[in-house]
């Protein structure tokens, strides 16, 4: 270590605990989750991932059946719907902020994007309440019923929408929640494109559309990053989803049916899980899966972000 | 497409950026088949002048332009900038091939955008032609799918030149294209520029801050100082018999 003033040495050592704790939290989380999920694996094996029923019994582990298959699929389906719906909005909004709002109106631009950034920090329960009280019934009446009437022969829409709380509602609500994240990730990269490339593209006689396409091509890795990070957030989102997904063990293969996600399952079942043998352990397995999804999607996302080339 | 000859004529051009009067009553004429060098010390308004010609000045917040910039029969200042730029190629001071496109794609993008060629073979031919014109073909013909970051600075600049040439622009603007590249590439770029002007009867305008380069490659010189045209005439005359004291000083490296 290079020479340090005495007071700086003290300063340096005072930083060590914070740094250690921050880096250890993830490791500890992993250890705890693995520790508590181990009994579930021991008792049921990998059957918990393939079983489609959830029938806990207070008497014994033998008569209990815990299947994570449906919530797992529900998590994937709702997160994919969310990403697919949010992506075009995120990209369009970035182009709108950076290219359509005129150069001289920086205040407008910053205010506009601040508003979107603020959305990333809103309490998710607010989205959930709005989704349950307003969005779900609205979608049932104006989207699901017509969809069922017209496209009911297609398996995706072949179930009668009884309530508005469905896997599709969860996906749509999630898309609204992750759109600002994807916007931020993409815009952050877009803003860093050096002026020399913008000039190069314009000098070729490109229209705004052609120009935007070239610029988006330049930050394509950040779009992939946005997709991944958005997916991770959507998969882990809990409160809002628990309110609108319906919380039933129906296969999410029909988008108009209520279903379950891992996060909603944990939130709903954890309260009384102690009454049933191994239920806590199975729920922790779900948590472990969510953690893995979050870690993998974020690590990949960050890797992609670093892949954007700003110099030739 | 018929090879139309487009003369560039600038008359009474005044440009302000914010409160700064950058160009004052500037005039010039650049004729097809010739190279016109715009020279002057840095900050004299040279780059602004060529950015008015292809309307890149529009990007500068607070810019105001008055006067006439004619390309052929069109007044650039009153036209759709996209249409103007399609017929004008530009090479910048900083080599700027698109980093996310391969060497091939960088050259092909112009023709593809403007529908000059649809078939793969046609585009191949244009790409080869442009890279040859930019004196880069021999160095990259076996690695057209490489990315520009694998090229040297001088090669990147020649790639930028090839990208501009691929559209066969009737007017080619160059903003100090050799300021940041090696001497070998500089020679190649200069040779390409002269060849392109002569062979295609194109109107070439190059901004340079070195009188030596202006002398080497141009037919006419426009000398600008603090936003005003000080001297304008055939290169030989301006270099050998400058009429103005300021020009003499600039050629002698004093201003």
Image (cartoon, coloured by chain):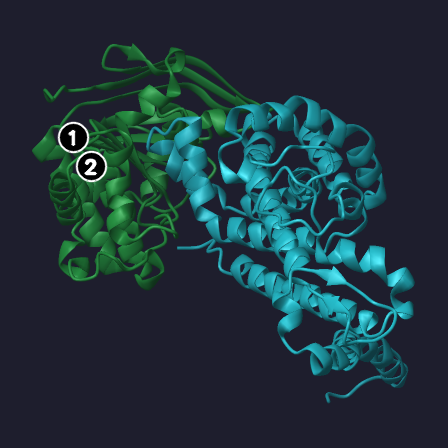
Chain colours: A cyan, B green
Q: Residues within 10 Å of mark 1 (few under 14, many from 20)?
A: many
The image quarter containing residue B116 is top left
Residue B94 left/right relative to A26: left
N-terminal label among 1 and 2: 1
Q: Is residue B177 above or below residue B36?
A: below
Percent across and percent down for residue A110 are 70, 34
Instruction: Tell me the number on the disc at residue A219.
Output: none
The image quarter containing residue A48 is bottom right
Same chain check for tags 1 and 2:
yes
Q: In front here: B158 or A19?
A: A19
Q: In front here: B109 or A13?
A: B109
- Is any part of residue A123 visible from this angle? no
Q: CA distance from mark 1 to mark 2?
A: 7 Å
Q: Which residue is mark 1?
A: B34
Say what secondary structure mark 1 lies in: loop
Q: Quadrant of the N terminus of chain A?
A: bottom right
- Is any part of residue B110 visible from this angle? yes
Instruction: Tell me the number on the disc at residue B218.
Output: 2
Q: Chain of mark 1?
A: B
Q: In front here: A194 or A156?
A: A156
């Amino acid at each position: 270590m290079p020479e340090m003033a005495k007071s700086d040495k003290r300063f340096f050592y005072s930083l060590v605990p914070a740094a250690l704790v921050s880096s250890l939290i993830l490791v500890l989380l992993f250890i705890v989750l693995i520790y508590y999920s181990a009994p579930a694996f021991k008792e049921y094996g990998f059957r918990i991932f393939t079983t489609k029923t959830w029938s806990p019994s207070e008497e014994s582990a033998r008569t209990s059946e815990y299947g994570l298959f449906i919530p797992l699929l529900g998590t994937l389906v709702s997160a994919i719907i969310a990403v697919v719906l949010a992506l075009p909005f995120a990209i369009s909004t970035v182009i709108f902020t950076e290219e359509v709002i005129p150069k001289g109106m920086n205040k407008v631009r910053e205010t506009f994007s601040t508003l979107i950034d603020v959305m990333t920090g809103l309490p998710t329960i607010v989205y959930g309440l709005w989704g349950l009280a307003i969005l779900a019934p609205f979608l049932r009446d104006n989207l699901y019923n017509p969809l069922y009437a017209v496209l009911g022969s297609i398996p995706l829409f072949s179930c009668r929408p009884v309530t508005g709380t469905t896997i599709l509602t969860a996906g749509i609500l999630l898309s609204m929640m992750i759109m600002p994240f994807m916007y931020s990730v993409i815009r952050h990269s877009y803003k860093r494109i050096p002026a020399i490339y913008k000039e190069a593209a314009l000098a070729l006689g490109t229209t705004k559309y052609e120009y935007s396409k070239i610029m988006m091509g330049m930050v394509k890795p950040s779009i992939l990053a946005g997709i991944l990070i958005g997916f991770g957030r959507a998969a882990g989102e809990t409160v809002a989803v628990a309110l609108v997904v319906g919380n039933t063990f129906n296969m999410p293969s029909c988008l108009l049916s209520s279903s379950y996600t891992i996060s909603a399952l944990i939130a709903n079942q954890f309260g009384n899980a102690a009454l049933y043998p191994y239920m806590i352990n199975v729920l922790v397995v779900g948590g472990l899966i969510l953690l893995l999804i979050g870690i993998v999607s974020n690590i990949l996302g960050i890797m992609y972000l670093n892949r954007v080339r700003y110099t030739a | 497409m018929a090879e139309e000859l487009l003369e560039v004529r600038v008359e009474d051009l005044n440009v302000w950026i914010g409160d700064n009067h950058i160009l004052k009553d500037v005039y010039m004429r650049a004729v097809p088949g010739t190279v016109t060098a715009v020279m002057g010390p840095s900050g004299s308004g040279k780059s602004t002048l060529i950015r008015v010609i292809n309307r890149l000045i529009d990007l500068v917040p607070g810019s105001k332009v008055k006067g006439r910039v004619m390309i052929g029969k069109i007044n650039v200042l009153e036209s759709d900038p996209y249409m103007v730029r399609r017929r004008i190629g530009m090479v910048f001071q900083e080599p700027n091939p698109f980093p996310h496109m391969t060497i091939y794609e960088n050259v092909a993008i112009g023709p593809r955008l403007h529908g000059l060629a649809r078939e793969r073979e046609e585009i191949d031919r244009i790409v080869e032609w442009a890279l040859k014109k930019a004196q880069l073909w021999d160095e990259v013909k076996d690695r057209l799918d490489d990315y520009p970051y694998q090229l040297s600075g001088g090669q990147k600049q020649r790639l930028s030149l090839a990208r501009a040439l691929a559209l066969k622009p009737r007017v080619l603007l160059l903003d100090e294209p050799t300021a940041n590249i090696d001497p070998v590439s500089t020679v190649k770029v200069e040779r390409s520029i002269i060849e392109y002007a002569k062979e295609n009867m194109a109107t070439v305008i190059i901004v340079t801050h070195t009188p030596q380069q202006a002398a080497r490659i141009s037919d006419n010189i426009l000398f600008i100082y603090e936003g005003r045209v000080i001297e304008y005439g055939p290169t030989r005359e301006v270099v050998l018999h400058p009429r103005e004291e300021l020009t003499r000083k600039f050629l002698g490296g004093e201003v």
